[in-house]
């Protein structure tokens, strides 16, 4: 057990670099008008990983045992890393900057070309950054709960088998991947069509908050598995639109600091996710169900 816990801690520490590194790479190498679609493509693969993991894990455990899950997924991760490193252009390896112009709303770099310090940011930006940090906390609260507890909910309250719950759990994540990809494309089209960037980001965040909250409030009333899976798909799919909202907005106003700021908000989000998992465990043990979990998550 100690080895498994240590491996999980190491895995979490390593995977915590993914989102900040992705944001920094996009800000450094991708023109401003294509950043939404680039981020959405990254998160599409991210969500496809969750979907395939849930789809295959149950069957692997039933046929060859739980150890095979870690061995198979670890081997895929190593192979994918090697392919990605080999395919990476030399300009990206050297950290070549995008030639896109700095917009009026961006925070400019210092005279030496390095990002200005956090205390030198305009005063109007601090409330916005605080609001963005809260957005990340809210997103991770729901994301961590469903990623960890969705198969349990399907098996415990809807009567799915281990293999069946894996399949049903994977379907919403495939929709999430599709929504991640399409939201970035739509956002870039709207901006190219003359929409102001902040209005596009606000629209996407409205979808990413109102959509999941509505689906979660309706979920406790679902009595048929197909309805429950549909509502879960709506919840995750609309939440994925935040890629074209929160994440892309950072690229708009703070490109030189997108990676480091996302690292800070992601830390807060992971802490929120840990608290959320402890909360779910306590509620399920006390009440025997997920009704309160869904309602509280909708409120958040």
Image (tube, grey):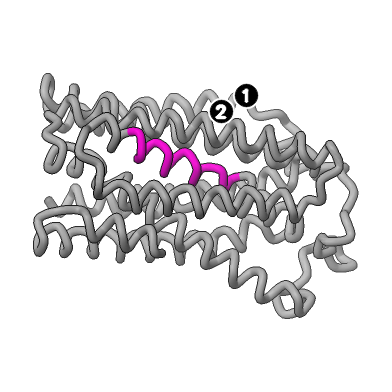
Which residue is nearer to you in this view: 204 or 1? Answer: 204
| Percent coordinates x, y for residue 42 in the rendering | 57, 36
Determine which quarter of the picture holds residue 249: bottom right
Residue that extends furthest to the top in the rendered view of this protein: 63
From which residue to which does the magenta span run?
230-243
Q: Residue at x 64, y 45 (%)?
A: 244
Residue 180 is left or right of residue 187, and the answer is: left
Location of mark 2 (residue): 84
Which residue is nearer to you in this view: 153 or 262? Answer: 153
What is the crowding at mark 2: few (fewer than 14 residues within 10 Å), some, or many (at least 20)? few
| Percent coordinates x, y for residue 226 in the rendering | 27, 29
Distance CA(mark 1)–CA(mark 2): 5 Å
Location of mark 1 (residue): 87
Q: Secondary structure at mark 2?
A: helix
Q: Residue at x 42, y 51 (%)?
A: 214
- Quadrant for the C terminus, please: bottom left
């Amino acid at each position: 057990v100690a080895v498994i816990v240590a491996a999980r801690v190491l895995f979490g520490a390593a995977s915590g670099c993914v989102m900040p590194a992705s944001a920094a790479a996009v800000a450094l190498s991708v023109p401003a008008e294509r950043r939404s679609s680039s981020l959405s493509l990254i998160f599409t693969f991210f969500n496809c990983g969750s979907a395939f993991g849930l789809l295959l894990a149950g069957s692997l455990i039933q046929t060859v045992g739980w150890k095979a899950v870690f061995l198979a997924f670890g081997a895929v991760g190593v192979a994918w890393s090697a392919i990605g490193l080999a395919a990476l252009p030399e300009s990206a390896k050297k950290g070549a900057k995008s030639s896109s112009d700095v917009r009026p709303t961006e925070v400019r770099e210092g005279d030496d070309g390095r990002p200005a310090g956090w205390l030198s940011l305009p005063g109007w930006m601090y409330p916005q950054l605080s609001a963005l940090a809260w957005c990340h906390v809210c997103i991770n609260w729901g994301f961590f709960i469903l990623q960890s507890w969705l198969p349990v909910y399907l098996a415990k309250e809807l009567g799915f088998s281990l293999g069946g719950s894996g399949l049903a759990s994977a379907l919403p994540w495939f929709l999430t991947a599709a929504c991640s990809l399409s939201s970035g494309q739509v956002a870039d089209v709207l901006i190219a069509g003359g929409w102001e960037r902040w209005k596009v980001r606000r629209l996407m965040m409205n979808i990413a908050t109102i959509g999941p909250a509505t689906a979660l409030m309706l979920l406790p009333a679902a009595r048929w598995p197909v309805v429950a899976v549909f509502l879960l798909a709506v919840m995750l799919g609309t939440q994925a639109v935040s890629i074209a909202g929160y994440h892309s907005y950072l690229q708009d106003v703070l490109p030189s600091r997108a990676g480091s700021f996302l690292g800070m908000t992601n830390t807060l989000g992971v802490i929120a996710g840990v608290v959320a998992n402890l909360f779910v465990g306590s509620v399920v043990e006390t009440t025997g169900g997920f009704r309160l979990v869904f309602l509280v998550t909708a409120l958040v």
